[in-house]
């Protein structure tokens, strides 16, 4: 995973600088995520990995699927990634682009995974606590994972706050083993 991050970083930073220069962070975020979705498709991923399929053919396919919203600069970005054998990095490039965008906008992206659906009041309370803790605006994505048993796990970048029952049980089991 860290190798993917290292390989994706220069591309994410380059496209971020370009997006900033064009004052179009939202548009480029949409383009990068659209491209990430395309290359994440199992059929496209198989073509990317197939040495018998030329990078020009794969590039053309991705540009065609992305459509007119990609634009000339977006198509050039795809071509550069293809020439360097880095198309499969697009999901990681998208994640790093989002982190750079959030930092530039003074916001944090948080993913709150709870054992069950949270009420709006609970979400608002969590967001208020995160804003106070990090002194920044927080954009939240919600997810539900019944395997957590109870509580929630909050992921903000590299930081994870595990307040789940499953996490507490795992920590207890680890402490009892030691």
Image (tube, helix red, strand yellow):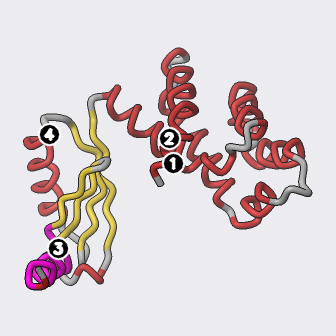
User: Does the magenta portion include 169?
Assistant: yes
Secondary element at tag 4: helix
**From the viewer's perspective, is residue 133 above or below residue 48?**
above
Q: Position of residue 34 (x, y in %)?
A: 61, 47
Mark 3 or mark 4: whose residue is earlier in sequence: 4
Secondary element at tag 3: loop
Q: Which residue is mark 4?
A: 134
Q: Are marks 1 and 2 in contact (CB under 8 Å)?
A: yes
Question: For the residues carrying marks 1 and 4, which lies nearer the camera in this image?
Answer: 1
Q: Position of residue 160 (x, y in %)?
A: 23, 57
Q: Which residue is mark 2?
A: 6
Q: Position of residue 120 (x, y in %)?
A: 18, 62
- Is 117 left, or right, of 86 in this rendering? left
Q: Position of residue 84 (x, y in %)?
A: 73, 37
Q: Which residue is mark 3?
A: 164
Disc 2 crowd, CA 10 A, few/some/many (<14, 14-19, 20+):
few
Quarter of the rendering occupied by the C terminus: bottom left
Residue at image location 22% in from the left, 65% down from the top: 153
Mark 1 or mark 4: whose residue is earlier in sequence: 1
Residue at image location 68% in from the left, 54% down from the top: 39
Secondary element at tag 2: helix
């Amino acid at each position: 995973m860290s190798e993917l991050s290292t390989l994706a970083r220069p591309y994410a930073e380059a496209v971020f600088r370009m997006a900033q220069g064009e004052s179009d962070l939202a548009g480029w975020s949409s383009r990068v995520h659209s491209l990430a979705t395309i290359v994440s498709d199992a059929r496209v991923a198989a073509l990317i990995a197939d040495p018998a399929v030329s990078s020009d053919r794969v590039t053309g396919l991705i540009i065609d699927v992305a459509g007119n919203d990609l634009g000339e600069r977006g198509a050039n970005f795809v071509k550069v990634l293809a020439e360097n054998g880095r198309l499969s990095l697009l999901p990681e490039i998208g994640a790093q682009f989002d982190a750079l965008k959030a930092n530039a906008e003074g916001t944090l992206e948080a993913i709150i995974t709870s054992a069950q659906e949270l009420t709006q009041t609970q979400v608002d309370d969590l967001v208020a606590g995160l804003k106070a803790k990090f002194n920044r605006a927080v954009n939240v994505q919600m997810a539900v994972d019944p395997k957590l048993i109870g509580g929630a796990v909050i992921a903000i970048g590299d930081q994870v706050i595990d307040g789940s029952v499953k996490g507490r049980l795992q920590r207890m089991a680890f402490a009892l083993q030691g």
